[in-house]
Image (spheres, rainbow, N blue to C red):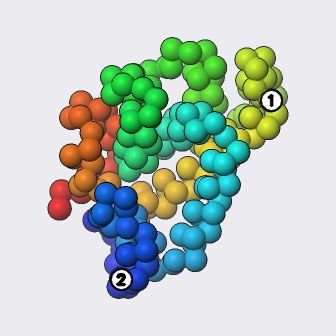
Amino acid sequence: MAFIETPSNPEFCDQNRAAAGHIPNFVTTFAARPAVYEAWKQLNGAIKQSMDLRRYELATLAAASALKSSYCCLAHGQVLADKFYTAEEVESLVGGPANDPVDRAVMDFARKVALSADAVTQQDVDDLKALGLTDADVLDVVLAAAARAFFSKTLDATGTQPDSAFNGLLPESLRKNLTVGRAIHSG
């Protein structure tokens, strides 16, 4: 499930049980540093609050797929498939460009932020603004992608595998397409 062992923290784990009733593997990983997890939830919540949820999920999926984070791709791909797209449409978002030019530009930008933020240029920002995004919208995409980099890298560097619950939550084809890095936990 992970490369590191964390101390038993049943109270923390119970407080962060998933809506489906299981304790996500990432919660177990953060059990050694509950204050960091609480700070993450606060930061991520503040970022999501300022954004349209669909755009947040698109930027997050783009950053997670660029970083090869199966856990985050599966979680955010599931949100997109549950709330905004068909499973087939979500598969195409991971494997290729979005159909909508604004969505495509947002996802391309989020990938660039996640992989090489130092290469972002004024032209990249101007291109988004030409499609109707404001400076605040661009900042939101940057924040979503940068925050995803923290969370994805933490999970992957600790060897935290995606929850086995994803096996029953997503159609097989979508699940395979969203598994871009670490395999789903088999237990």
Callout 1 secondary element: loop
Pointer 2 residue? 10
User: Which comes sooner in the sequence, label 1 or label 2?
Assistant: 2
Left or right, 108 with respect to 137, comes to left
Q: Which quarter of the rendered picture does the C terminus lie within?
A: bottom left
- Classify residue 63 by image quadrant: top right
Mark 2 Cα shell of 10 Å, populated few (<14), some (14-19), many (≥20): few
Name the residue located 68 percent from the left edge and 55 percent from the top edge: 46
Left or right, 131 with respect to 70, comes to right
* Residue 134: image tag: 1
Name the residue located 50 percent from the left edge and 19 percent from the top edge: 98
Q: What's the CA distance linking mark 1 and mark 2?
A: 44 Å
- Classify residue 178 by image quadrant: top left
- Classify residue 65 by image quadrant: top left
Question: Label 1 is placed on what type of residue?
Answer: Thr
Question: Label 2 is placed on what type of residue?
Answer: Pro
Left or right, 85 with respect to 88, comes to right
Residue 62 in picture, x, y percent from top left: 52, 35
* Residue 32: image tag: none
Residue 37 in picture, x, y percent from top left: 54, 69
Name the residue located 23 percent from the left edge and 34 percent from the top edge: 171
Check if mark 1's residue and mark 2's residue have beta carbons within 8 Å: no
